[in-house]
Amino acid sequence: MAVSAGFKTDLLGAIPSLRAFAVSLAQNADKADDLVQETLVKAWDKQTSFQPGTNLKAWLFTILRNEFYSQMRKRGREVQDSDGIMTGRLAVHPSQHGMLDLGDFRAALELLPEDQREAIILIGASGFSYEEAAEICECAVGTIKSRVSRARTRLQEILKISGEADFGPDAIATQVMGSSAIA
Amino acid sequence: MYRMTKDQEGAPGAKPRRNVTSDLLGANTEIGRKLKQYYDELVSDDVPDRFAQLLSQLEKAAPAQKKD
């Protein structure tokens, strides 16, 4: 159990990523910091169960994620900002050639269901592989892939951007515009 | 016109096996770029002292044999 010093340093180093992930999940800075705190305490208590040499960040993300969902369950699945309200508030204009506003993007992320949001964050931002993300989320790799793909599609719809579909047939863009007009 | 370059010929429907990440969310997609910008901003946030303090407290209270 002489690992403590190194372990502490490693935990300290992981805090910025943990906070980023926590904010992405909880969509609230205070709740996020509470999650991080809880994660650090749990990680500390369970440090002997961490296999040195394996991915500490993934291990911590797993703890944080479990904590997030168990808190959500305790609170009886907290009022998710209802899609309608948020969508109404979201006056996102069609993006001007990559000049999409970060605030709009943040608001759009908030509209995603948690499972899709966490998947797209883990893969697209936190730098995890699909395999690692699947382990963190305790699901199949294919499930992560489809969540990421749905998240991306949904973000494109909300933000009314067509991304790589720019190259595709116009039908795709029309479809996207059509569906978001209905939504 | 705004054009992004892609490694492979993007025949619609042809699903690339590898580098799914870069295809879906790579730096050459707007979503991919925004996602990283969003996240990097969060990561570079200043970390409150409370976390370092917490870890020091945990360290003082012997790890394996916690005396609650």
Image: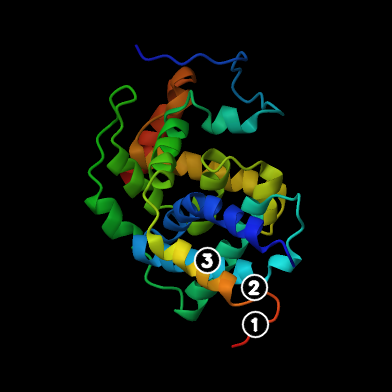
Q: Which residue is denoted by mark 1 in the rendering? A: B66
What is the chain letter for disc 3? B
Residue identifier under label 2: A45
In the displayed structure image, the side of residue A95 where residue A42 appears, left or right: right
**Residue A47 in view here:** yes
Q: Secondary structure beneath disc 1?
A: loop
Residue flagged by tag 1: what amino acid is it?
Lys
* Colour basis: rainbow
Which residue is nearer to you in this view: B65 or A158?
Answer: B65
Evaluate if marks 1 and 2 touch, with contact meaning CB atoms under 8 Å apart.
yes
- Taking the image as shown, residue A131 lies to the left or right of residue A165, namely right
Disc 2 crowd rating (10 Å Cα; few below 14, some 14-19, many 20+) is some
**Circle 2: element type:** helix
Q: Where does residue A21 sit, x and y in percent of width and height?
A: 49, 53
Q: Which residue is mark 3?
A: B55
Q: CA distance from mark 1 to mark 3?
A: 14 Å
Q: Nearer the viewer, residue A139 or A82?
A: A139
Mark 3 residue element: helix
Task: Check disc 3 and give the amino acid type.
Answer: Leu
Could you tell me which chain the residue with mark 1 belongs to?
B
Residue A146: give x, y in percent of width and height: 61, 45
